[in-house]
Image (tube, rainbow, N blue to C red):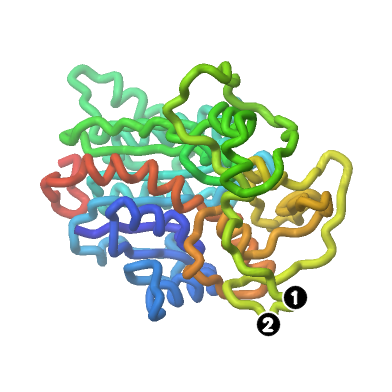
């Protein structure tokens, strides 16, 4: 059976899917440089990915050419229409490609669908559209008519779902989750939507494996500092998070991973790009700005940014042990996004920053996808595009 990843970018979601058991995977991406990255990492001697790369715009893809049954359709549709830092145009933004994801679902009839997007999708202003997407996933056979407004399509779906004897074609679950709670050395909140064919067991999201409280406890008791063989430091607890447990209360979860954890063992960065291996060289010019402090070595990193709209000072930067602010190297941000060191990126700094910053952290994707892979084991294939017939 076939697994498909739309808007594959540099392969963060695909790497997570592979770790969960979904491989090889057909990778669809239109950005030329991202496709160069994907091809390198599927074809090199140290390949990190398995699958075929399709360099094409999925708005033009004719899914009728896919003749194999599809097990999983995964997609991280462009997040800019719903990002807190974007123009907030949602469905009115030309980059909103949820309709294309749903067109693929209707055509391919996969056993399961895994979608990922930014937490901005849950804003009150976007809630009606978000719920519309969920309703389409539940009964994709109710297709939009040519030139039909989404509000009118949504009304037809609602009426269909209220009819006597209605049964969903897919069962849909969604959650807002933080990557730090699943072993990623970065606070990064994302919305996951999982749709599974109605004849399959209900998908359950995995429980968090790491916690803020466990990290504070480890640092307070000294275990963290002993592990890194450095003197104890006073760590300023900042940002929002779960309430701290009393230090004498046990927490079965592991400590949040920190930047220091992520960067352990990395060689010294080259001074110039031309001398660098692993996309690892010193980037000068980091500056402090009001309200934008760099990440701490001994806390999960702030969310890695793609830099598409200009990265403000303090983003993608680190305060080192000497108190000096500097930019992360590209390999460092790749580690914070949990890419393996053998996964290399193609393009100039701005292109690679965009590829890494737009990615789903690989280990985050793997944590969500593993129970889905377990659920699909042994599921009977359906004919392409006939999951609900």
**Is disc 2 placed on a helix, strand or loop?**
helix
Quadrant where the image shows the N terminus: bottom left
Instruction: Give the quarter of the image for residue 388.
Output: top left
User: Secondary structure beneath disc 1?
Assistant: loop
Q: In screen coordinates, is 105 left or right of 383? A: right
Residue at screen point 55% across, 43% down: 257
Name the quarter where the C terminus is drawn. Answer: top left
Q: Say which quarter of the image contains residue 62.
A: bottom left
Q: Could you tell whether 176 is left or right of 217 in the image? A: left
Q: Position of residue 55 (x, y in %)?
A: 44, 72
**Disc 1: which residue:** 271
The residues bearing labels 1 and 2 have C-alpha atoms spaced at a distance of 7 Å
Image marks 1 and 2: residues in contact by CB distance under 8 Å: yes
Marker count (numbered): 2
Residue 170 appears at what percent x and percent y? Answer: 26, 35
Tell me if mark 2 has few (under 14), some (14-19) or many (20+) residues whose alpha carbon lies within 10 angstroms of its own: few
Left or right? Give the position of 313 relative to 245: right
Residue drawn at x 43%, y 72% is 41
Evaluate whether residue 82 shows in this view. Answer: no
Residue corresponding to mark 2: 275
Q: Position of residue 227 (x, y in %)?
A: 57, 45
Q: Residue at x 33, y 42 (%)?
A: 143
Res 247 seen here: yes
Frontmost residue, 142 versus 100:
100
Mark 1 is surrounded, within 10 Å at the Cα level, by few (under 14), some (14 to 19) or many (20 or more) other residues, namely: few
Q: Which mark is residue 104?
A: none
Of 321 and 305, the residue lying toward us: 321
Q: Is residue 249 above or below residue 266?
A: above
In the rendered image, residue 334, in percent from the top left (x then y), is placed at 57, 60
Quadrant of residue 376 within the rendered picture: top left
Residue appearing at x 47%, y 62% in the figure: 340
């Amino acid at each position: 059976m076939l697994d498909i990843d739309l808007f594959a970018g540099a392969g963060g979601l695909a790497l997570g899917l592979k770790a969960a058991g979904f491989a090889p995977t057909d990778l669809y991406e239109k950005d030329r440089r991202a496709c160069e990255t994907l091809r390198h990492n599927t074809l090199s001697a140290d390949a990190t990915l398995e699958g075929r790369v399709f360099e094409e715009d999925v708005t033009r893809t004719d899914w009728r050419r896919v003749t194999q049954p599809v097990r999983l359709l995964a997609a991280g549709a462009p997040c800019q229409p719903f990002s807190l830092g974007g123009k907030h145009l949602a469905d009115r933004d030309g980059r909103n490609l949820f309709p294309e994801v749903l067109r693929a679902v209707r055509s391919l009839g996969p056993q399961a669908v895994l979608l990922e997007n930014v937490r901005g999708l849950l804003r009150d202003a976007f809630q009606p559209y978000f719920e519309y997407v969920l309703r389409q996933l539940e009964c994709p056979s109710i297709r939009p008519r040519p030139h039909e407004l989404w509000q009118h399509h949504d009304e037809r779906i609602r009426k269909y779902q209220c009819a006597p004897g209605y049964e969903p074609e897919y069962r849909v679950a969604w959650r807002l989750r933080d990557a730090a709670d699943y072993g990623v050395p970065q606070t990064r909140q994302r919305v996951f939507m999982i749709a599974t064919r109605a004849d399959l067991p209900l998908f359950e999201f995995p429980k968090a494996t790491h916690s803020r409280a466990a990290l504070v406890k480890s640092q307070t008791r000294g275990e963290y500092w002993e592990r890194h063989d450095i003197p104890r430091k006073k760590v300023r607890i900042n940002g929002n998070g779960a309430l701290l447990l009393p230090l004498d209360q046990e927490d079965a979860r592991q400590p949040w991973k920190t930047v220091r954890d992520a960067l352990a063992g990395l060689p010294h960065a080259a001074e110039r790009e031309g001398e660098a291996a692993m996309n690892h060289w010193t980037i000068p010019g980091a500056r402090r700005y009001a309200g934008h402090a760099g990440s701490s070595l001994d806390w999960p990193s702030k969310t890695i940014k793609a830099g598409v709209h200009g990265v403000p000072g303090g983003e993608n930067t680190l305060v080192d042990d000497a108190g000096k602010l500097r930019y992360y190297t590209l390999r460092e941000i790749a580690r914070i996004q949990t890419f393996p060191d053998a996964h290399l990126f193609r393009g100039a700094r701005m292109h690679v920053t965009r590829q890494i910053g737009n990615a789903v952290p690989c280990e985050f994707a793997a944590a969500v996808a593993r129970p889905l892979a377990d659920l699909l084991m042994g599921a009977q294939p359906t004919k392409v595009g006939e999951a609900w017939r």
